[in-house]
Image (cartoon, rainbow, N blue to C red):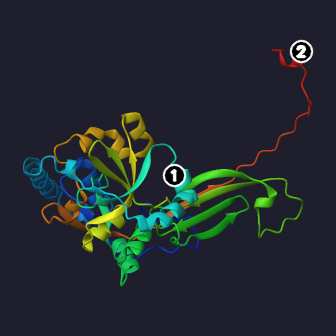
């Protein structure tokens, strides 16, 4: 969302900025140009030809990497995970985040080499990675590293809420991961802390929140595509960690891949799993293709409108077969 709509009362405009590390030279060029000129601070005044020139220079460097590092993604190291983490793994697997998010394909926990993870995300929020670093400050034990990568115990960015009308609500968060999950039917006994003005027969819950945030990757043959946890993986690599606990899901065909991956990845899976030199996590630290961009510190806003329609119909009870067969 580019700006605060005028009809949002009480939600202050964000005046601070953030910084993002971008991988230059990766297609599509048009997306990069649009982002720089529409979103980056000062981008509207940037020379479009200069932006194309810097993108082209970086794109030429990618060609060099295709020659000098061909096949590097096939040599990512996958280690067995330490047995001391077994109780923690069991705790993660018992959580709803894992049970609901990792129930389609074969899954395992392993220690993966960070720098050779393939990335489909073209930029990371540097300010967010700085906040993540604080969680590991002073404690780099294997156990702490595991919970950093599998944060089922942690708290998320707070959500602010406002009622805009009897059937209209606004919720917002500073996290770009804030999203609609699902609508759920709830029984009265599942509701607490609510004082009804009459007997409650049922409730409908609109679930809003965040992704699982468990560090995980998709494996096809010998390659690993980072699926979730780009900021955590980036932070660890910047701090000097070479390997990290990761959930690996294995795919053997495109239909399986389409169940899991992002739209960018599913649009061209051969680019990530067949190209001689796809973009890797370590590329975010290569000065020849890394660009730091200042962008506004945005909020993610979700507006919920409830549309209730009342109908009356006769209760026919058990409808006999002769009536139900009528046209």
Location of residue 274 in the rendering, given as x and y in whole percent from the top left corner: 22, 40
169 lies above or below 33: below
Q: Residue at x 44, y 70 (%)?
A: 147
Q: Report helix, strand or loop for mark 2.
A: helix
| Residue 109 shown left or right of residue 69 in the figure | right
Q: Cα distance, mark 1 to mark 2?
A: 46 Å
Location of residue 112 in the rendering, given as x and y in whole percent from the top left corner: 31, 59
- Which residue is identified by label 2? 322
211 lies above or below 147: above
Q: Residue at x 33, y 39 (%)?
A: 267
Quarter of the figure with residue 166: bottom right
Query: In front: 143, or 114?
Result: 143
Query: In front: 136, or 258?
Result: 136
Q: Residue at x 19, y 63 (%)?
A: 290
Q: Residues within 10 Å of mark 2 (few under 14, many from 20)?
A: few
Location of residue 250 in the rendering, given as x and y in whole percent from the top left corner: 38, 44
- Which residue appears farthest toward the front when viewing the image? 83
Is residue 298 shown to the viewer in this render? no
Quarter of the figure with residue 276: top left
Q: Report helix, strand or loop for mark 1.
A: helix
Q: Residues within 10 Å of mark 1 (few under 14, many from 20)?
A: few
Disc ID at residue 101: 1
Location of residue 305 in the rendering, given as x and y in whole percent from the top left corner: 65, 54
Is residue 192 shown to the viewer in this render? yes
Query: In front: 322, or 109?
Result: 109
Nearer the observer, disc 1 or disc 2?
1
Quadrant in which the C terminus appears: top right
| Residue 196 shown left or right of residue 269 in the figure | right
Disc ID at residue 40: none
């Amino acid at each position: 969302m580019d700006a605060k709509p005028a009809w949002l009362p009480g939600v202050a405009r964000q005046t601070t900025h953030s910084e993002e590390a971008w991988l230059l030279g990766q297609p599509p060029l048009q997306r990069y140009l649009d982002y720089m000129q529409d979103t980056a601070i000062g981008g509207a005044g940037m020379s479009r030809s200069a932006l194309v020139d810097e993108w082209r220079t970086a794109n030429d460097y990618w060609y060099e990497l295709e020659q000098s590092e061909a096949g590097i993604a096939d040599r990512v190291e996958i280690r067995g995970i330490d047995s001391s983490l077994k109780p923690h793994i069991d705790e993660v697997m018992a959580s709803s985040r894992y049970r609901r998010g990792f129930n389609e394909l074969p899954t395992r926990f392993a220690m993966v080499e960070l720098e050779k993870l393939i990335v489909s995300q073209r930029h990371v929020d540097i300010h967010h990675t700085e906040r993540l670093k604080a969680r590991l400050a002073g404690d780099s034990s294997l156990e702490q590293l595991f919970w950093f990568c599998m944060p089922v115990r942690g708290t998320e960015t707070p959500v602010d809420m406002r009622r805009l009308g009897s059937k209209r609500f606004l919720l917002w968060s500073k996290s770009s991961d804030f999203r609609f999950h699902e609508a759920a039917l709830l029984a009265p006994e599942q509701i607490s802390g609510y004082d009804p003005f009459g007997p409650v027969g049922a409730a409908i819950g609109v679930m809003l929140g965040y992704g699982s945030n468990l560090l995980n990757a998709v494996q096809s043959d010998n390659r690993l595509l980072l699926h979730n946890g780009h900021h955590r993986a980036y932070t660890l690599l910047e701090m000097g960690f070479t390997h990290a606990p990761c959930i690996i899901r294995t795919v053997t065909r495109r239909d399986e891949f389409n169940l899991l991956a992002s739209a960018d990845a599913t649009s061209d899976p051969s680019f990530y799993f067949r190209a001689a030199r796809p973009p890797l996590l370590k590329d975010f630290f290569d000065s020849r293709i890394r660009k730091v961009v200042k962008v506004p510190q945005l909020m993610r806003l979700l507006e919920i409108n409830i549309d209730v329609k009342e109908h009356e119909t006769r209760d026919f009870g058990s409808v006999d077969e002769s009536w139900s067969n009528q046209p």
